[in-house]
Image: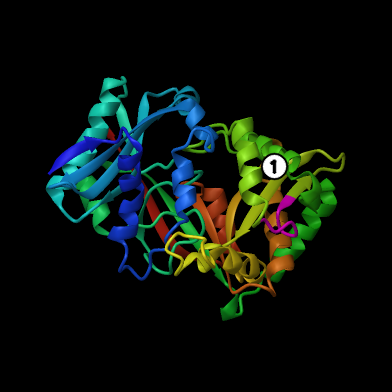
Amino acid sequence: MNIRKVDNKADLRRFIELPYRLYRDDPIWVPPLRREQWAQFDRARNPMLDHCEYALFLLEDEERVVGRISAFTDRLALEHWQEPIGLFGSYECIDDNEGSQLLLDAARSWLQQRGMKAMRGPWSFASQEWGLVLEGFEPPPVLLAPYNPPYYNDHLTAFGMEKAKDLIVYDVDFREGYRIPERYLALTGNIQRRYGVHIRPVDMTRLEQEVGIIVELANCSLSDNWGFYPVTAGEARAMAHDLKDIINPEVSLIAEDRDGKAIGFSLPLPDVNMLLRGLDGRLVPFGWLKLLVGIPRIRQYRLWALGVVPEYQGKAVDALLYRRTYEVLGEKLDRLEINYVLEDNIRMNNALKKLGVKGLRRYRVYQMGI
């Protein structure tokens, strides 16, 4: 086995195609759209790369690709965290300890050469795709959520990596007759009257501006969260472009105070992964039609992001956002998946447990000193 650095389009194609071969017979994995995978490594289409330096590596066994990894530094993350932490991601490998060690060592060496003192991951070039599945490998992953075979965790621990943080996923199954507790409805009604909070849907006629508001709220409300670093204006514009075809304005919510100032947001997204199964990552010849017809009918959502500005945290504004989502979608859904929640975010975990939702999955982000 040997390591090969990706430095041409042919190697990048081999890098992108590897998961489609490794997971071909896995009934749980959902093939992402190939065009979206290519976009992750295109500076013209992925503004995150404007503040990243990265390298991609292939693991070859007699010229056959059997593994891959990315290593990168993110200027905004380094500035926000104030720690020399490098990142790795896009990790895929056959179940071979020697091969996995070669891959991880390639990423470590590249990061060491750039002065990094720690290596953290898996971490993606796409928003919020962090960690490895540690518990709860079924049901299949939702939109923008990672998936991996269990042995990937063994690869990382064998290399000397340790837990940095666990991320918890919750599940609301409406097919089991879930109803929001009455005491929760009373609480949120009192809160709304006390603080004059108004919940409104996103205005699709000015989506780019609305996404800009959401990004500003996220940068303010989540700035102290572990792993967070600011989203740029360019990333906000790209997000607006990516979301315009799937976003449901009824439940894409912005909370405002009595003076009309935005103080919180909630962004549930239809789980498009339900439609991607069987397409092998391609929209032609009939994938476009399947998405066009299927998206309005999706009965499974992922609560992708939620935040409340610091001065309104602890005042149940997040509860109001949950309630509105339930009121609009409750009769139309089979499932709502809530992810990620940091394991040590006691307030959020307690609030979700009081809502009567169930734990579903656990992701783990790893780290090691280098």
Residue, x 62% and y 34% (percent of image)? 219
Element marked by disc 1? helix
Q: Can you identify the residue that label 1 sits on? A: 211
Q: Is residue 42 left or right of residue 2?
A: right
From the image, which quarter does the C terminus lie in? Answer: top left
Determine which quarter of the picture holds residue 53.
Answer: top left
Residue, x 63% and y 37% (percent of image)? 236
Q: Position of residue 76 (x, y in %)?
A: 50, 26
For residue 356: magenta?
Answer: no
From the image, which quarter does the N terminus lie in? Answer: top left
**In the image, residue 125 above or below residue 80:** below
Q: Position of residue 38 (x, y in %)?
A: 44, 45
Q: Is residue 4 left or right of residue 265?
A: left
**In the image, residue 185 above or below residue 63:** below
Relative to the observer, which residue lies in front, 220 or 123? 123
Q: Position of residue 124 (x, y in %)?
A: 42, 42
Residue, x 74% and y 56% (percent of image)? 249
Tell me how the rendering is colored.
Answer: rainbow
Regarding residue 342, the answer to whether it shows in the image is: no
Furthest toward the front, the residue is 285
